Image (spheres, rainbow, N blue to C red):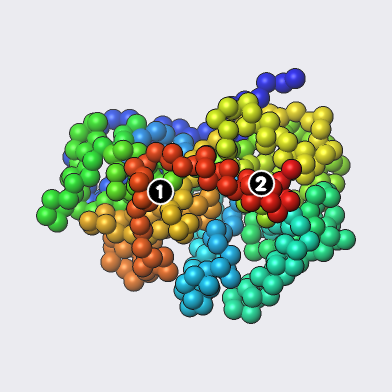
Amino acid sequence: MSTVKDRPYWWEEAEPRPADEGTPPETADIVVVGGGYAGMGAAIPLSRAGRDVIVLERDRPGDGASSRNGGLTSGNIRHSFSKLVNKFGMEHAKAFYEEGMTAREDLFSFIESEKLDCDFQLTGRFTGAMRPEILESMKREADMMHRHLGIEVKIIERADQHDEIGSDLYHGGAVRSDMGGLHPGKLHRELRRVAEASGAKIFSGVGVTNIERVGGTFTVTTPKGKIKANHVIVCTNGYTDKGLPWLRRRLVPVISEMIATEPLSPNLMATLMPKKQMHGETRQLGHYYRPSPDGTRILLGGRRYDNDAAKARERLRGGLLEIFPDLSETELSHHWFGFVAFPMDELPKLTIHDGVVYATGFCGSGVVWARWMGQKAAMVVMGQEEGASAFDKVPFRAIPFYNGTPWFLPVMMNWYKLKDRMTGTLK
């Protein structure tokens, strides 16, 4: 049995590298806290506008979810369109979904215009229905999205399922052709390249321990000294620590982990993933999976609910085999994890509190949302109308009896598992 590497598969080609590890300047126009997709998304337009921008990253830029995620360019919102209509009304629900569509298209356009080398492919995404009645509800949702949003969702009956995936697990599903995949590590590397070329000063190994507003300016305290700034943008998401207590009380960090198989034969890959699509499923604790950009491996991820890494890896492997029994003899090459973050209402956030702009709460869909919200935050700082977002008026509430340590997470995970069992979608 080969040794499974406990580092992201993506790092084989694009491991994050340190930035300037020295002492940041004592003054700046704008301090961006967090060096992932959102931080780079904020730094690029600000620097290109001639603003003096410092990006502070506690670890290596891109060391968090930006280089650990699945690379699915979905721009998903956790809630279905119909659920958002019921909760917020048609006007707001349409605004939420339409912004997701615009954010996704903006990422695709940015990749093309900036010639970002990130293995982007507009492959489409297949979501498998775990039960026949779920497929029927997917049909109703697809019709509603087409009528009100113009989104084309192709329903796949079970009899035609093997055209999309070499698995008998699902009872049909739905395909979105406007979604695709990329190499997340390469995407961050390219965003950082553009940010640095634009003039942003990026520092690694510099966490933030306090942000204080003094009159019309801010004092950002770090272990390497204090920085006076005119504006502060915070983009830490699932890696928010005690130095940002206001945000920490509003975000739940959740472990999302992935496995990668050893290389598979071209014939087997063509059987299992004939269209080289991105994939998901309708379980509460479902899996997301995809081919590697070179089409030689399958990468699969899901939420972790076991502290033991070996057990967690076997759970993911069990999910892989449930979907693709033909892989029973296939070894794994990599197993890794990262943190995503969820606000209480599971909606992305663009919020201003005490003068600080927060771009956060991407709910596991940060490949599209993080850069978009970081860019929006930059526009807010520059006073541009384009900084307006459908999400900027939604309250960003603190979670009751919560200080940043998610003591309730095991209870939530067990509830989701119970729901999956009750609906017959979890063995």
Residue 8, given in percent of the width and then of the height, sits at: 58, 33
Residue 352, given in percent of the width and then of the height, sits at: 29, 59
Does residue 5 show up? yes
Quadrant of res 12: top right
Q: Which residue is drawn at 55% across and 58% down?
A: 78
Q: What label does residue 287 carry, if any? A: 2
Q: What label does residue 251 carry, if any? A: 1
Does residue 181 show up? no
Helix, strand or loop at mark 1: loop
The amino acid type found where label 2 is placed reads His
Q: Which residue is drawn at 50% across and 52% down?
A: 363
- The quadrant in which the C terminus is found is top right
Of residues 331 and 281, the one drawn nearer to the viewer in this rendering? 281
Helix, strand or loop at mark 2: loop
Q: How far apart are marks 2 and 1 (CA)?
A: 22 Å
Q: What label does residue 178 carry, if any? A: none
Mark sitting earlier along the chain (2/1): 1
Near mark 2 (Cα within 10 A), the count class, few <14, some 14-19 or many ≥20, is some
Residue 406, given in percent of the width and then of the height, sits at: 43, 41
The amino acid type found where label 1 is placed reads Leu
